[in-house]
Amino acid sequence: MTETLMSRVLAATGGGRPAPEQGTTPAVEPPAAEATPAQVDAVQAYLDKHGDAFAASLPKTVSLEEFQAAVAALLPKVAGCTPASLRLALLTCARFGLVPDGYEAAIQVQGKRAVFVPTYKGYVRLMYRSGLVASVHCGLVHEHDEWKVRPSAPAPDDFTLTTRPDLDEEERGKALFAYAFVTLKDGSRSQVVYVNRTKAAEVRDTWSYGYQLAEQQGRRDSYWHQHFDHGMQKTALKQLFPWVPTSAELVALAQADDAGERGDVQIVHAPRTEAEALAAEAERAHRAAEGSQETAPLPVKRSKQGRTYRGKKQRGGRKGRVS
């Protein structure tokens, strides 16, 4: 039997258990409380232990100090996540050269898992970094803007938008749809892609495990809850991919983003020497977040010499080990 997104959410929140008697409310796992200072300190020490991995992952354009400052600011909200998932989310963020400060990337909580979430601005940054496009345009059309879409007309007459800069966001009215297009190096312009609120909500409801989990838990703290319009813009940028040249890095970013949306392990871009161990750790954390009722620790394997290990041996002496 194929497991659906909703069935996984129900399992994570207790909804997969036998239905309660009529007139009663099913028990829902309460949202994780903000971490205590002691928990934050412990997680900070754990991340500091792996500081060399973050330093090696970051490109020269992002300093380790800037990255660490952003991590320190978000720790009170994410320190309750499993260390393996938090480490993986931050390593993935670092390897794309993004800072988890909510501007180009964020770290969201899904049950006990930390999840790397690139924003639409993170996508724009990597599109520029690829060197394959001259400019990127991604915006919102509001109900009081003047706009016209004529698909059969040549660019730039196929899409025109007039806004009033003297109006603030509230005066412009609700965002109706997002648009995205790029100008290529030769001066030509790509197709314009549009995503309205209905389409964005369909993508959210179909693919976002984090959104559905938050809904089941009675919370409104998922990325889609807090930044629907940004999610609409990101969806437009991702739907632009078939019409524009994309780098391997940009494709990998979309793969990591999609994995996080589905509630899967974001192993894309993990260090090669650590990929297997991180995947195993993150998968265990994933199962725990999805409502496993088993509290016993995982069995520890022992070699004939009595040494303990948690899976296949890593070759290469100390280099192959994962702390």
Image (cartoon, grey):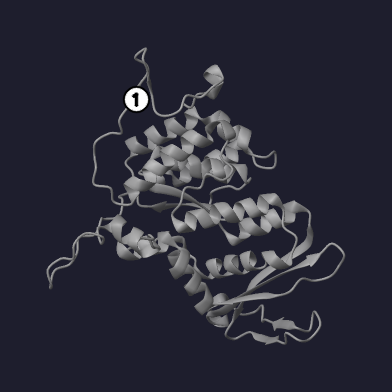
Using the rendered image of the protein, determine whether residue 240 is visible from the camera's viewpoint: yes
Q: Using the image as rendered, state which of residue 126 and residue 13 is in the foreground.
A: 13
Residue neighbourhood size for the residue with mark 1, other residues' Cα within 10 Å, grouped as few (<14), some (14–19), many (≥20): few
- Residue 123 image offset from top left, x and y in percent: 64, 58
The image shows residue 304, relative to residue 175, as above or below, that is: above
- Residue 167 image offset from top left, x and y in percent: 61, 80
In the image: residue 281, left or right of residue 156: left
Quadrant of the rendering where the N terminus is positioned: bottom left
Disc 1 is placed on an element classified as strand
The image shows residue 265, relative to residue 224, as above or below, that is: above
Residue drawn at the location 60% of the way across and 33% of the way down: 55
Using the rendered image of the protein, determine whether residue 220 is visible from the camera's viewpoint: no
Q: Using the image as rendered, state which of residue 226 and residue 184 is in the foreground.
A: 184
- Residue 223 image offset from top left, x and y in percent: 46, 61
Q: Using the image as rendered, state which of residue 208 and residue 58 is in the foreground.
A: 208
Q: Quadrant of residue 205?
A: bottom left
In the image: residue 45, left or right of residue 157: left
In the image: residue 247, left or right of residue 319: right
Residue drawn at the location 48% of the way across and 54% of the way down: 260
In the image: residue 278, left or right of residue 105: left
Q: Using the image as rendered, state which of residue 171 and residue 296 is in the foreground.
A: 296
What amino acid is found at the position of numbered circle 1 in the picture? Lys
**Going by the picture, which residue comes out furthest to the front?**
1
- Residue 310 image offset from top left, x and y in percent: 39, 28
Residue drawn at the location 37% of the way across and 41% of the way down: 284
- Residue that numbered label 1 is attached to: 301
The image shows residue 226, relative to residue 118, as above or below, that is: below
The image shows residue 12, relative to residue 83, as above or below, that is: below
